[in-house]
Amino acid sequence: MDEFDARMSRRDAERSRRRAERQKTVRRQKIIMAVSAVIIIVAVVGGVIYTRPSVRLSRALNSGDRYAQEEDYESAQNAYESALQTDSSSVQAYRRMADNYLAQGKVVEAKQILYEGWEQTQDEDLLHYYCVELHNEAVEEVNQGNCTFATLDKFIQVLELEADNEDTLTALIAGYDHLFRVVDEETVCRQFFDEDTSHDVCEYKEYEQLIRRLLAVYEESPSGGLKEVIARYALVDMPYVWISIPHLEAYTKLLEDINDIVKDSGITETLACLTRAAEVEDYFNTAFAEFESGEFAYARVLVTDETYQQIRDDFIEGDSGCWEGSIYIPVNKEQLVLHREDDGIRFFFPDGEDYGNHSGIIKIWGTKQEDDGVQRSVISYEPVPEEGADSHIEYTVQYLYSNVKINGVYVPQMNYRFDTKITTEDGITTNAIGDWGGDHEWEIDY
């Protein structure tokens, strides 16, 4: 019995031990399962948090900043691009990408990303940063003496976005002083001048487009500072300004539109000059057409016309107003010159000595030359020089009171004289026709 009891006791003890081991194993398994579940939950939650757009954006920005500090600009660029892929409306990503470009001296790229950022986000700070970079770029060009109409375009772009930008308004005045800089009293502006008016390659159209953009900004956001800028750019304050005739009408209209706003006496005076020049051009259009075709008989009509003789008399009497000249007043179809001095502004048409690419020049002679108290009326025409010609031709028609030989007797009466003067290296020869077109016409060469 004792032995039996001992065996039973040992068996019960073994069973208890195994039961305890099983319970311990079960508890360990439960603990492992619980810990694993916690780990899985933490991992899942952490993964979710880690992959949230805001976290990914922050990581990309911080990464880009570290690369930028290390001057690894390419890696920084990639990081900032990744940030924008995460959130295309991130103002910070656009701003830092622009800073990364600027650190490399890539101003164009910086401006572009700032503007793209503003378009995407409509964030006013990005727009302002863009305007600052655009303004600074233009100011640098002015300070370096490289101011062009392209420089003005940058300033005007700023005003189109920030019309009240006082710094840009001030810079535009400085830009004008550099663009139209007076060096001496003979300084000539040829920015609106085409040597060959059949090829419009001058800067007038670009100039007008810029000024009209300023007018548009003023219409939307009028201000005294902008009005001052427009008034300054309306006139080129240089002693001589060459304007190709094809631009005359457009420039006149531009000044009229500007003067509706600024009411400037200098613009008003310039408009009077341009209007008078246009009237002269219109008046001589028929003469140019006739003379170019070799029909000089029209000159007999012209020199006796009341308007022509009034032009002649005003010139003789020094009362031509804003039209200036010396011995004669030239007219051509291609070029006009505005001459500005302290006492005002006048105009003239350059003659063949100043402008050789003309298609013909008419000269109104204004010397006081009377015959028995009758003032002569004289006009001449210089045709376009023939290419390679070694001679110069000038046709002159005079209406004068002089002797006409009638039946062997000289009789004083009004008549016409037509001279053809040819100048060569050897000298001058003239063919003169007296009583030209009359009943007693005569001809002589000398």
Image (tube, grey):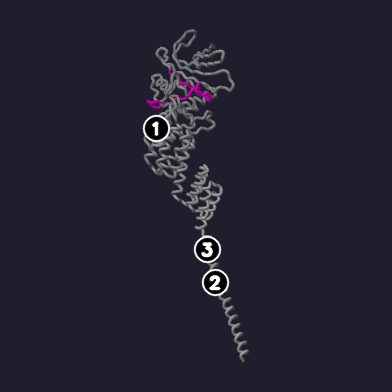
Q: Is 37 left or right of 177, judged from the image as shown?
A: right
The disc, 2 or 1, on the residue closer to the chain's N-terminal end is 2
Q: CA distance from mark 1 to mark 3?
A: 73 Å
* Residue at horizontal 41 percent and vertical 22 percent from the top: 310
Q: Residue furthest bottom?
A: 1
Q: Nearer the viewer, mark 2 or mark 3?
A: 2
Please state which amino acid type lies under the numbered disc 3.
Gly
How far is the residue under mark 2 from the one under mark 3?
Answer: 18 Å
Residue bearing mark 3: 46
Foreground label between 2 and 1: 2
Q: Can the viewer see residue 387 in this picture?
A: yes
Which numbered circle lies on residue 34?
2
Above/below status of 39 relative to 58: below
- Bounds of the magenta span? 341-366
Q: Position of residue 49 (x, y in %)?
A: 51, 62
Q: Of the residues tagged 1 and 3, which is closer to the observer? A: 3
Q: Earlier in the sequence, mark 1 or mark 3?
A: 3
Residue 324 screen position, x and y as percent: 42, 23
SS under mark 3: helix
